[in-house]
Image: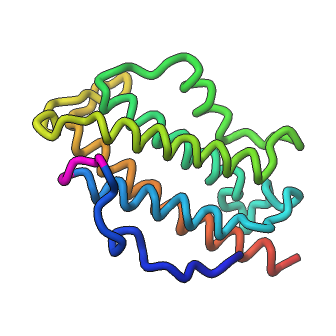
Amino acid sequence: MAKIDAPEFWQRGPVPEIPALLQPVAHALLQAREEVKSIMGGFPDVLLWEKPAGMASCAFHLQHLSGVIDRLFTYARHESLSEQQFEDLAAEKIERGPDLTVDILVKRFEVQIDKALDQLRLTDESSLTDFRPVGRAGLPSNVLGLLFHSAEHTMRHVGQLLVTATFVQHKN
């Protein structure tokens, strides 16, 4: 795990082309990407599925990080989830073999962050309070709520990933 010497992203100034009201979302997602790369740098694939005290594995957190951003940004676009997104959601909870590696999961997360930033660049600030139904139940939210929740939920799981990765590496 490499130490990050740069200031946090929110202290590095505006992210180019991101609307002003969405800068905190972009900063959090970029911070998450940087921290995940640091946490998982040199992490052994053999420990990906370890579940200390029955808690979620690093593999779960990495898959969930990508998945939650994908799903919440889909709802923010006022789209329904695809069958593939439902399959990916179900797969987050299933332990799988060597087809998933640290490198694959971190790269998948980085790609999802890039897609999210592209969507933020295209988001019209005047749409931020537009109603967006969430899930099959159509729970009430809006564009800003979904985008903000994606950022805070992502950071929550980055914290959990840090604790889990640190623990499983030091217990072995």
Residue 109 highlighted magenta (yes or no) = no
Q: Is residue 110 left or right of residue 117?
A: right
Displayed quadrant of residue 86: top right
Q: Residue at x 31, y 40 (%)?
A: 121
The residue stretch that appears in magenta: 17-21
- Residue 114 rendering spot, x and y as whole percentages: 49, 43
- Residue 99 rendering spot, x and y as whole percentages: 85, 38
Q: Is residue 60 left or right of residue 46?
A: left
63 shown above or below 123: below
Q: Residue furthest top?
A: 83
Residue situated in front as seen by the camera: 130 or 34: 34
- Residue 167 rendering spot, x and y as whole percentages: 73, 76
Residue situated in front as seen by the camera: 133 or 75: 75
Q: Residue at x 49, y 79 (%)?
A: 6
Q: Residue furthest front?
A: 16
Q: Residue at x 83, y 79 (%)?
A: 171
Residue 18 highlighted magenta (yes or no) = yes
Residue situated in front as seen by the camera: 149 or 19: 19
Colour scheme employed for the rendering of this structure = rainbow
- Number of labels in the image equals 0
- Residue 62 rendering spot, x and y as whole percentages: 64, 51
Displayed quadrant of residue 137: top left
Q: Residue at x 71, y 64 (%)?
A: 40
Rendered-image quadrant of the N terminus = bottom right
